[in-house]
Amino acid sequence: MILEILAQHQPGHPGGFYGFPLPLVGIVLATLLVSWLVSSTLKRRFDEYSQIPIRMTGAQVAEAMLRQSGINNVRVICTPGKLTDHYNPMDRTVNLSEPVYHTNSVAAAAVAAHECGHAVQHKQAYKWLTLRSKMVPAVQIASQLLNYIMIAAIFGMFFLGPTTIWIYISLFAVTTAFAIVTLPVEFDASKRALVWLENSGLAASMEHDKAKNALFWAAMTYVVAAIGSLVQLAYFIMIALNRR
């Protein structure tokens, strides 16, 4: 989204690529490339570890972890798609994708335990998860407003002066902050998952290192997104300050 607005604010700029400032083009392309590499590695690892069987399906792992963690008010449900797994604190559900829910593999167990790690965080009122949940309404509003500003700028509905630029920066900062706050939430959930898998006795049969590696690459997708957002925000602020 920043590309279009920055382009609008570089009138007559002699450099760049199709009107876009080269530094930002480089940042965006680098972020996309790294994101693609991480996502591709995650998919390869998931496919590889999905071929290593264990005695429990992802759904059974999730139910066992919740039960042993003293959580009785969270449901484990199957959701369509692949790598669509998530924990919903609003309706207290662990949503496992079809391959994870039905499959008895290292990958399925690691993902299921990770999502249950979020349920444990919720029960214990883990501060970063609480903060992220509180940020959700603000992030949703900020994302919508960013889209409105971008569309309005593209169609020339209003002039993007300094005030509008700083409003855009402020809104983008909200989404960037959310991406950063997400990092400790995801890493902590993976840590809880690995501890439970080891203590449960599943680790020996499911090869603990492979589960750890799968969760590592899953976490890296969030790291790349946060770094990319932070770098773009910093560059946008620099552009705004230089135009004063």
Image (cartoon, rainbow, N blue to C red):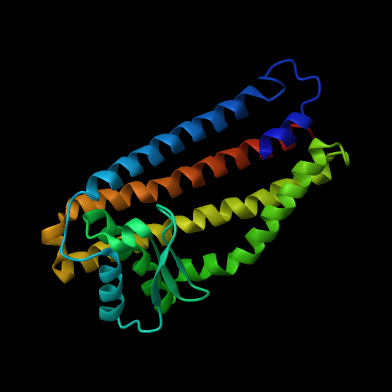
Q: Nearer the viewer, residue 102 or 215?
A: 102
Q: Nearer the viewer, residue 144 or 14?
A: 144
Spot occupied by residue 243 in the image (x, y as percentages of width and height): 78, 32
Q: How many marks?
A: 0
Taking the image as shown, residue 11 lies to the left or right of residue 59, namely right
Q: Is residue 169 above or below residue 40?
A: below
Q: Position of residue 80 (x, y in %)?
A: 44, 59
Q: Which quadrant of the rendered structure holds the N terminus?
A: top right
Q: Quadrant of the C terminus?
A: top right
214 over 193 or under it: above or below? above
Answer with left or right where residue 181 lies relative to residue 186.
right
**Does 107 sit left or right of 80 as displayed?**
left
Residue 161 in the figure: left or right of residue 215 = right
Measuring 50% from the left and 34% from the top, which residue is drawn there? 32
Give the percent coordinates (x, y) of residue 3. 67, 34
Displayed quadrant of residue 237: top right
